[in-house]
Image (spheres, coloured by chain):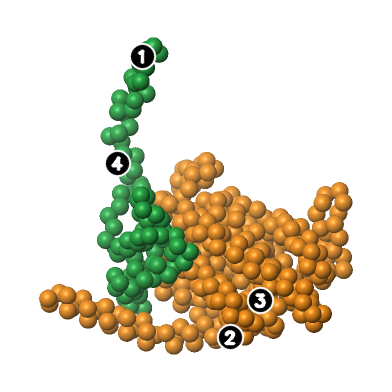
Amino acid sequence: MTKQEWPLYEVFIRSKSGLSHRHAGSVHAADDEMALNNARDTYTRRNEGVSIWVVRSDSIVASDPAESSAFFEPAEDKIYRHPTFYDIPDEVDNL
Amino acid sequence: MYTQGLDQAGKGDSPKSGGETKEQLDAFQARIDAEEKIEAKDWMPEAYRKTLIRQISQHAHSEIIGMQPEGNWLTRAPSLKRKAILVAKIQDEAGHGLYLYSAAETLGVSRDQMVADLLSGKAKYSSIFNYPTLTWADIGAIGWLVDGAAIMNQIPLCRCSYGPYSRAMIRVCKEESFHQRQGYEIMLTLCRGTPEQKAMAQDALNRFWWPSLMMFGPNDSASKHSAQSMAWKIKRFSNDELRQKFIDVTVPQADFLGLTVPDEKLRQNKETGHYEHSDIDWQEFFDVISGNGPCNETRMAKRRKAHDDGAWVREAARAYAAKKAEASAAA
């Protein structure tokens, strides 16, 4: 039965131009074109989008939450990347 | 509510633990207590996963079966406007079912498995959809009362600890308000119409009042899985709390319509402001949820037939996709 299930697609919607696409959910579809149509009917019945991306769920490469502290560790100790790291006297303006 | 099957005292096994260590469970509970959302690939106890799969899939099944009582009046809606509105509402119910199946799939259960469990009768859906829609006024009563009760339950679910479920519920809640308002407007139109139309509205209220209260599930004292679901912040309010809230907001709406809530003991407690009501006939609730309601058999038969009748479409779509893929590979 599982073999015959239509593949799963993740759906991303741009709600209006100027904003980036955002994950909305998923749909099953036999092919890419049907995935777009199903995504439109499922997630934009009230004009919630001006553009839709669909991508096969099994094509997404994701970081592993169990490894996330090690994965993001390189950024942890670099506080000098933030503007607040630097002491500037109050008299100096526009900085 | 849409997932009352979870609350039945003495029925169904509590999800088994998956051999987690106390440290893992404590760390997980600490995340929940800190109001952190749990996401699909995060570590979670097996019982949390199983509880969510059961709850979200039952919720999805309820949306899907919930299309039937309303579909019954689609071809007999009193005007083109009402018909267009009803089609849109039924489409929303299908959409809600799909958002929820999608959320449940993030927990590792397949769509086919969930559908199979519904069709085999293994999975439950809300008792409310096993009552017939005998008149057009029932469509009004469903929107007003059934969707009203659903909103009461679903708003706290927007803050559920599981991210994908919470996001699906936010989407659902945005759409649900239209359902309730169109239902109340149907009731209002009938109540301002002829005496026969008003009597029809009263009759619908009489038949849907008690089943709507049952949607919130058994009394807290008899609700088996509530405590764990509360601790995991899947559930935020108890069945009785939500039911009371629903009664308190709905009775004045019935008063405005000039309709009488079918409960002789109903009265407002001047001190607390809450309405006191008669006991609920729990035998009826357990009968309906265990398969012996007025429409259980027809609902399931219709769902199975729709699934079987759609088999060739699913087949054809797969064949067409395969053919196209072949052609583009050859080109």
- The residue nearer to you, when weighing B305 against B175, is B175
Is the same chain shared between marks 2 and 4? no
Per the image, the residue denoted by label 1 is A92
Separation of residues labelled 1 and 3 (CA atoms): 69 Å
Residue sitting at x 50%, y 80%: B119
Residue placed most toward the observer, B236 or B145: B145
State the CA–CA distance, disc 4 to disc 3: 54 Å
**Judging from the image, what secondary structure is the residue with disc 3 in?**
helix
Check if mark 2 and mark 3 are on a common chain: yes
Q: Amino acid at mark 3?
A: Ile
Q: Is A77 displayed left or right of B97 in the figure?
A: left
Which amino acid lies under the numbered mark 1 shown in the image of this protein? Val
Q: Amino acid at mark 4?
A: Phe
Q: Which residue is mark 3?
A: B139
Q: Are marks 4 and 1 in contact (CB under 8 Å)?
A: no
Check if mark 4 and mark 1 are on a common chain.
yes
